[in-house]
Image (spheres, rainbow, N blue to C red):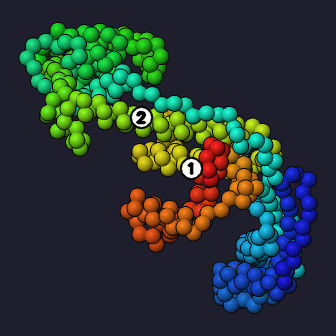
Amino acid sequence: MKKKEETKSEIKNEKKVTIKIEGKDWEKLIDDAFKKANKTAKIAGFRPGKAPKEVFIKHYGMESLYYEASNKAVEKAYDKMLEENNDLEIVAQPRVDMTNIGEKGVEFEFTLTLKPEVELGTYKGLKAKKEKVKVTKEEIADSIEHMREHYKENIVKDGKVENGDVAVIDFEGFKDGVAFDGGKGENYSLEIGSNTFIPGFEEQLIGMKAGEEKEIHVTFPEEYHSEELKGQPVTFKVKVNEVKEVKIPELDEDFFNDLGMEGINSKESLEKQVKENIEAQKERKAEDDWLNALLEEAASTMKVDIPEVMIEDETSRMIDEYAQNIQMQGITLEQFYQFTGLTEDKLREEYKEQARKRVTYRLMIDAIIKKEKIEVTDKEFEEEVTKMCEKYQMTKEDFLKNFGEDMIRYDLRVRKVFDLLKGEKK
């Protein structure tokens, strides 16, 4: 038999629930724990697994079975707690403490964090306005220039290295006549003027020809990462293998073909397309900035006492999201900490305020949905599923399996809240 007791917590938005596992339920768990422990028990006169229960208990004590039994009991207690409190909105993983254990049963106290009450402020007729989007000729020209840079070619040339050329070099660095670690490279392509090497290095390559060798003298910066080399004068023995001229393509037919953009066959058509792309990008940013401003404005007049555990859970989610993103780039979170010198505590501190905003906005949106009685019709749901299936090239069955009907309907309700904040028809 399982019994539930409830106590009020002194902390706001917390509820303490006591669950007892006793009687036949506890007896079975103790018996299961005994059978498991008896398999390896060493008791004189009995083979492992053959000692009677009363002999085992006399030898090891009833307490030796409590750990295993209580581990199984807490699972049953957790399920029972959720079942008996399914009317509550629990917003964080419940904390559980074992408060009593003995021959007659075990008792657990669950601390539940409940969804806080929200007192909405002003969320209609907000003052934040959407910024008007404008694309300048300079932005279009810069974008096209970047496209040309992307398709630039390095062509081997005769003659001397000039600023802007690419010098393909072998090099080795020496400090006090001794080669140092990390100071050697072969067939390294160095763009002169890129300032990627130690100050003064690239400039001393200007005027050299393919096949020419030279000693270059430079001094490492004071802020250089190596303690051994920072601020130290060194010598590089350098050989130029090739000199390449950087050729940026003209806006001609070959370039337009390389772009592979449908309908782009002239400077004018390219400028038109680039303008539309920049406009769309700016429009998305303006929309996002406007929505963030509306959320911030609406949240500034609401009242809510957010449990700290909700902020902590959201911070953990943000760190998990970041870990997944960098993992796609082949970097683990541990490597990220090593590269940046950050720790999990520092990263949590950096994310904490943003996490607080996320939780605040989510609570506000849920409160607006409830107050405005925002619902999603079956027609709206089906239209959204059809659109998303086409977008992601998925069957309806697979799409619903991956995202779930509840999540899709909630997302549609949230969008209606956004429309309401914007002053648009929901």
Q: Is residue 8 left or right of residue 422?
A: right
Q: Is residue 377 left or right of residue 263?
A: right
Residue drawn at 54 percent across, 39 percent down: 287
Q: Position of residue 357 (x, y in %)?
A: 68, 41
Dot in front, 2 or 1: 2
Q: Is residue 414 left or right of residue 367?
A: left
Mark 1: secondary structure? helix
- When the figure is inspected, residue 145 is found, relative to residue 358, above or below; the finding is above
**Image quadrant of residue 95?**
bottom right
Q: Tag count in the figure?
A: 2
Q: Is residue 328 visible?
A: yes
Q: Which mark is residue 422?
A: none
Q: Position of residue 94 (x, y in %)?
A: 76, 61
Q: CA distance from mark 2 to mark 1?
A: 33 Å
- When the figure is inspected, residue 144 is found, relative to residue 321, above or below; the finding is above
Q: Which mark is residue 320?
A: 1
- When the figure is inspected, residue 311 is found, relative to residue 78, above or below; the finding is above
Placement of the N terminus among the 4 image quadrants: bottom right
Labels 2 and 1: the sequence-earlier one = 2
- When the figure is inspected, residue 73 is found, relative to residue 330, above or below; the finding is below
Q: Residues within 10 Å of mark 1 (few under 14, many from 20)?
A: few
Residue type for callout 1: Asp
Q: Nearer the viewer, residue 312 or 142?
A: 142
Residue type for callout 2: Glu
Mark 2 sits on what residue?
Answer: 279
**Image quadrant of residue 291?**
top right
Residue drawn at 79 percent across, 84 percent down: 25
